[in-house]
Structure formats: C-alpha cells, structure tokens
Amino acid sequence: MAIYKTGQEAPKTQNYSWVKYTDWTTTPSPTNEEKVIPLSKGEVFPPINSCDKGAYWSD
C-alpha cells in the first residue's frame, strides 16, 4: 500500500481511500463521498473540501 499527499499526481487510474489529514488528525471525518475518490493517472490528489484540509490517500 502506497501513501500519497494532496497535491501529488496519481500514478495510476483507480480509486483511492482517505487515510488522514496532513496535520496528522482524523477529525472532523470527511463526508462519505470524500473518503474514496476515483482518480485518473496524472490527476492531482485533492484536499478534503468539507473541512479545507490537505489529506493523505492510499491505493
């Protein structure tokens, strides 16, 4: 399992799962729609918009 950060490019097309925020917290919890996101290769990992925080993502 690899970990990616908001702002990095996705290495392949697939669904990615939220791990935690870049400030190492896990609250407030992202919405259900934000916890698993589909990205295409080259797309940029997004922040969690509902709380305006950067995030770590796993494949």
Image (tube, rainbow, N blue to C red):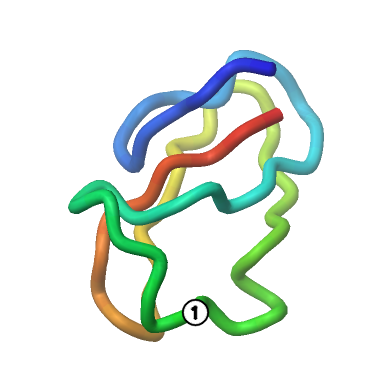
Q: Which amino acid is tagged 1?
A: Ser
Q: Secondary structure at mark 1?
A: loop
Query: Residue at 44% across / 37% down in the picture?
Result: 44
* Residue at point 37%, 34% (across, down): 5
Dot 1 surroundings within 10 Å: few (below 14), some, or many (20 or more)? some
Tell me residue 49's x, y (percent): 37, 76
Q: Quick check: 25 left or right of 9?
A: left
Vertical relation: 1 (above or below) 54: above
Q: Is residue 54 left or right of residue 34?
A: left
Residue occupying the point 31% across, 82% down? 51
Q: Which residue is mark 1?
A: 29
Q: Toward which corner of the image does residue 45 lie, by quadrant?
A: top left
For the point 53% across and 34% down, the residue is 43
Q: Relative to 28, is 51 on the left or the right?
A: left
Q: Nearer the viewer, residue 37 or 43?
A: 37
Q: Quadrant of residue 42?
A: top right
Towards the viewer: 57 or 7: 57
The N terminus is located in which quarter?
top right
In the rendered image, the quadrant that contains the C terminus is top right
